[in-house]
């Protein structure tokens, strides 16, 4: 079952073409990765998929629905972890989650129970009453993931979920994302970390300058080109991955 279908997607910013005729699909229960350097168009695609930015042309269908006409219904079934930190620093950890849950009409009592479960899942249960200002950068990243899960989404979209994290916290996020896969969740993530893509992604689309250069199962790419995904990127683009 195809959860996401992107066809001939184009996104222009004035005279700049950020995404150039991109097509791919994401199947139920898989982790699909968009791999490439900063400026390759990965985050732009993500923002179109979850309805933050309209496409210039092409189509995006999620759960069989068109994002242009059925964004409200779609957004109730997805969770988004943005690259930008957009937590309310005036509120506590728990208050951030309860307020966000209101967008999905989740009653406060239920939201608190869900929040406590998810905070425990991410190892943040001891910080539930702390002000967001007091959290480390890694804890804020983890809280963004907790917030993305508050509505029990079928599709989870993650834009550079571990950028800026130290190795220990990165491993923790990877373990949690692996757990979500085991629960049957469908994941889309953007990354420029080779190890992240190799560890999490069933399939990857390697991007360069707004285009998908190659798309295939991660294992198949590694078998065909050898080495690791950094070697694959070099062989299919002729460039070394620049972060």
Image (spheres, rainbow, N blue to C red):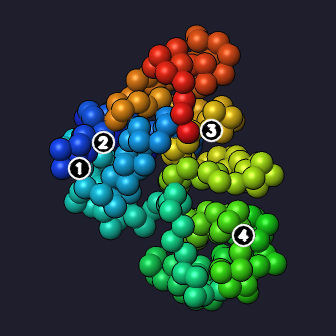
Residue under circle 2?
18
Q: Residue at x 68, y 85 (%)?
A: 131
Label 4 Cα crowd, 10 Å radius (few <14 / some 14-19 / many 20+): few
> Toward which corner of the image does residue 76 lie, by quadrant?
bottom left
Quadrant (top left, top right, bottom left, bottom right) of the C terminus = top right
Query: In the depicted view, which residue is nearer to us: 32 or 44?
Result: 44
Mark 1: give few (<14), some (14-19) or many (20+) Cα within 10 Å: few
| Residue located at (66% from left, 22% from top) | 228
Q: Residues within 10 Å of mark 2 (few under 14, many from 20)?
A: many
Disc 2 to disc 1, C-alpha distance? 7 Å
Q: Position of residue 95 (x, y in %)?
A: 61, 86
Label 3: which secondary element: loop
Q: Give whichever of discs 4 and 2 has the lower sequence position.
A: 2
Q: Confirm or deny contact between disc 2 and disc 1 (CB under 8 A).
A: yes
Residue 134: image location, x then y, percent: 71, 80
**Nearer-N-terminus badge (2/1):** 1
**Residue at the disc numbered 4:** 136
* Circles 4 and 3: CB atoms closer than 8 Å: no
Of residues 174 and 181, the one drawn nearer to the viewer in this rendering: 174
């Amino acid at each position: 079952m195809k959860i996401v279908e992107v066809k001939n997607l184009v996104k222009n910013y004035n005279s700049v073409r950020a995404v150039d005729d991109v097509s791919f699909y994401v199947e139920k229960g898989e982790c699909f990765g968009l791999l490439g350097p900063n400026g390759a168009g990965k985050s732009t695609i993500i923002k179109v998929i979850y309805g933050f930015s309209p496409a210039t042309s092409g189509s995006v269908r999620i759960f069989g629905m068109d994002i242009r006409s059925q964004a409200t219904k779609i957004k109730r079934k997805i969770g988004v972890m943005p690259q930008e930190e957009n937590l309310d620093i005036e509120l506590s950890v728990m208050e951030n989650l309860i307020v966000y849950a209101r967008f999905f009409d989740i009653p406060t009592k239920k939201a608190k129970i869900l929040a406590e479960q998810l905070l425990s899942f991410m190892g943040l249960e001891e910080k539930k009453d702390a002000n967001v200002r007091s959290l480390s950068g890694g804890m804020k990243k983890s809280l963004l993931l907790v917030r993305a899960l508050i509505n029990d989404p079928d599709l989870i979209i993650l834009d550079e979920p571990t950028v800026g994290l130290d190795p220990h916290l990165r491993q923790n996020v990877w373990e949690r994302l692996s757990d979500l896969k085991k629960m049957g969740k469908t994941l889309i993530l953007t990354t420029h970390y080779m190890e992240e893509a190799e560890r999490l992604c069933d399939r990857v689309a390697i991007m360069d300058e707004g285009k998908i250069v190659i798309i295939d199962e991660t294992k198949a790419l590694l078998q065909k080109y050898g080495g690791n995904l950094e070697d694959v990127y070099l062989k299919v683009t002729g460039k070394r991955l620049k972060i």
